[in-house]
Amino acid sequence: MSRERPWAAVVAATCVNLPLGSLYAFSVLLKPMEQLFAATRSELSMIFALATISFTVGMNAAPRLYGAASASVLVALCALCSTLGIALTAGAGGLALVFIGYGILFGIGGGIAYIVVQQGVNMMVRRHKGLVNGYIVGLYPAGAMIAAPLFGWAIGLWGLRIMLAGLATTLAVTGLVSIWLVVFAGVRLRPSSASAPQPLPPGGARIFLQMWTVFFLAAAAGLTVLSQAAGIIAAYGGSAALALFATTAITGAIAAARLGGGWLVDRFAIPQVMAFAHALALAGTILLTLWPDPLVSAITLAMIGMGYGFISGSSAAAVACYWPSSHYGRIASRLYIAWCVAAVSLPVLAGHLYDLTGGYRTVVIIAGCGNLIGIAIALTLPRQEEKKLDNEAVPHRLG
């Protein structure tokens, strides 16, 4: 067996996910796309929603591809798919090619790559799984934090098309580096034949349903912030400069929260961490409803986004706590269906309500109600110590 290098697998995941995280900087593209393609906010919301659907399709297809090709080959195909998608978007003459390039190819390539590198890392890492998984899921908003100011700067200097061409080039270069790192790390996607089968937790279906709902409720609010932060702040009277700065800061806060969510699961009970995350987001929605001010909107959107970030990081860590590592990709990809459903619910509704009313107040109230429900459900999850004892019991299959 080739020597395993977990650190190289983590670096490979970093190279793969950082540029793909530009998906979360989509709000910076709203105005330029509206002007270039004469598009409505609802149409652009649908493009973001389609990208998340494609991403989820890719994530759920990834575990079925483990036996068809090696990790390096899968990463190479994903890099090609994502690069081609952004290149098509850069040269698009209308929204149809944007739907195909950004909405489908970019999303599918990113989704498969996301699960492949996450599965590979979890097959290697033995300690601090919460922290490591929090770091991996934090790479997407971290990538958006880097992309948002670069996008704004490049669009202002060269225009939307040149900026997208630069993103396509970046995806191609980081894809090549990632392929080499995956090979060097000795990443494998399935246990060796000599490995003993690991038992699945009793009550897995119930736990999964609870986690799915908690994740969905947080993601609905968080993805609304990520996809439309600049537009929301502008709607509350904020300047373009404040909107761009806040978009960058919010993605950075979400990245830190995802890392923190995984780290907290290594130290505290999962129900407490997830309930705290929803409570933080709920506080943000209440403040923004009571004080609809531009600066308040920037701060409270960060709170809502961080609530989603803590849930995202703790959910990734919880999968590693509740289920064996060999099943990580399969369970995680199913959990991320909640992320997809969330993306086509509240963010799309937000764009539609904005076109009708010119504001986001109703959407903020809906998000707060979801956070309140999320707190109640999160507190019903088992502590990870309890599941560790349950794993010694008779295996029971999920679902």
Image (spheres, rainbow, N blue to C red):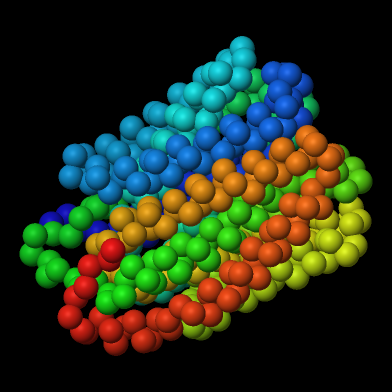
Whether 161 is drawn above or below 231: the answer is above
Whether 59 is drawn above or below 335: the answer is above
- Residue at the location (39% across, 66% down)? 208
Left or right? Give the position of 26 relative to 172. Answer: right
State whether residue 163 appears in this view: yes
Quadrant in the rendering for residue 331: bottom left
The spot of residue 350 in percent (x, y) is 71, 44
Please tell me which residue lies in front, 285 or 313. Answer: 285
Please tell me which residue lies in front, 170 or 293. Answer: 293
- Residue at the location (49% across, 23% down)? 100
Quadrant in the rendering for residue 334: bottom left
- The quadrant the N terminus occupies is bottom left
Q: Please tell me how many numbered marks the rendered image carries.
A: 0
Left or right? Give the position of 199 relative to 87. Answer: left
- Residue at the location (24% across, 45% down)? 64
Whether 166 is drawn above or below 270: the answer is above
- The quadrant the C terminus occupies is bottom left
State whether residue 111 appears in this view: no
- Residue at the location (53% across, 66% down)? 214
Please tell me which residue lies in front, 341 or 28. Answer: 341
Left or right? Give the position of 285 relative to 305. Answer: right
The spot of residue 157 in percent (x, y) is 76, 25
Q: Going by the picture, which residue comes out furthest to the left?
A: 194
The spot of residue 67 in percent (x, y) is 18, 45
The spot of residue 380 in percent (x, y) is 49, 80
Left or right? Give the position of 9 relative to 235. Answer: left
Whether 105 is drawn above or below 254: the answer is above
